[in-house]
Amino acid sequence: MTKIHVMDNEISIYTLNDEDYICITDIARYKDPDNTDDLIRNWIRNRNTIEFLGIWERLNNPDFKPVEFDGFRKLAGLNSFTLTPKQWIERTSAIGLISKPGLYGGTYAHRDIAYEFASWISVEFKLYLIKEFQRLKDEELKELGWDIRRNLAKINYRIHTDAIKENLIPAELTRKQITTIYASEADVLNMALFGITAKEWGKAHTGRTGNIRDYADISQLVCLSTWKISMPCLSTRIFPNRIGWGS
């Protein structure tokens, strides 16, 4: 469960099957904190709302029941007509709305539908809601990009060390000598790609976590993964005496 703040109101966001659902109970609280359920029922019984919900379900839900939908649409507009989110969900097999019980419960709507409800509540609130929701998605993309770079860096490092172990390290070397070979081989690539060694980068960026390759872009990481497959054999030819370094 994620939360955003819109015009001093906390709005909950629930993710299901990679789709985001926004709590319209929280949105209704902006208009009338004591009668959120009544506001939602008044909105959902509106003929325009039912038409919108029906079209959305037909576009996104193969299990939607059009016959039950037509029944609701015919009754919409009558003074005696009432409808709750739970009735809509159960009768039509709708997926655009979710009714969650419990402490953190309420009525959640797919973001497309939540925006429509927010317009009914307040156009100003809707615009701020869209802005805050997009800010949340932008932050999630930044975090995803960081995770991708971290994972690529780890994979590349494993490819690198395995290639060095298979091609450059004789079995009789000591642990200290092996460590020196790993470091020197890594810095051959670091110098070629970044123009700086890992140690030099660490001294220049003392406030950052991770290492130089954690901050590489995607194209640099692809270059690293490509070079690491061929570099051990190449570096042996370029630096034939490297095995003795650190001995």
Image: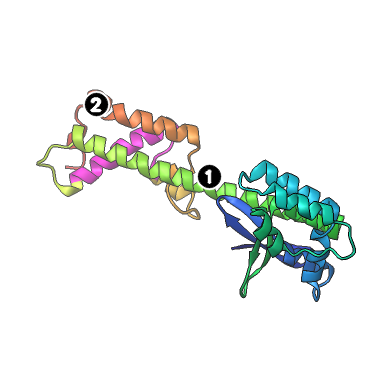
* Amino acid of disc 2: Cys
The mark found on residue 145 in the picture is 1
Query: For the residues carrying marks 1 and 2, which lies nearer the camera in this image?
Result: 1
Please indicate whether residue 177 sits to the left or right of residue 107 in the image: left
Please tell me whether residue 185 belongs to the stretch shown in magenta: yes
The magenta-colored residue range is 177-198
**Which of the pair 71/235 is nearer the observer?**
71
The correct choice, above or below, for 86 with respect to 58 in the image is: below
Quadrant of the rendered image containing residue 3: bottom right
Residue 171 in the image, given as x and y percentages of width and height: 11, 40
* Colour option used: rainbow
Q: Regarding mark 1 in the picture, which secondary structure is present there?
A: helix
Quadrant of the rendered image containing residue 167: top left
* Amino acid of disc 1: Gly
Please tell me whether residue 187 belongs to the stretch shown in magenta: yes
Q: Residue at x 42, y 48 (%)?
A: 211
Point out the tag, 1 or 2, that comes first from the N-terminus: 1
Please indicate whether residue 145 sits to the left or right of residue 69 in the image: left
The mark found on residue 222 in the picture is none
Q: Residue at x 78, y 48 (%)?
A: 52
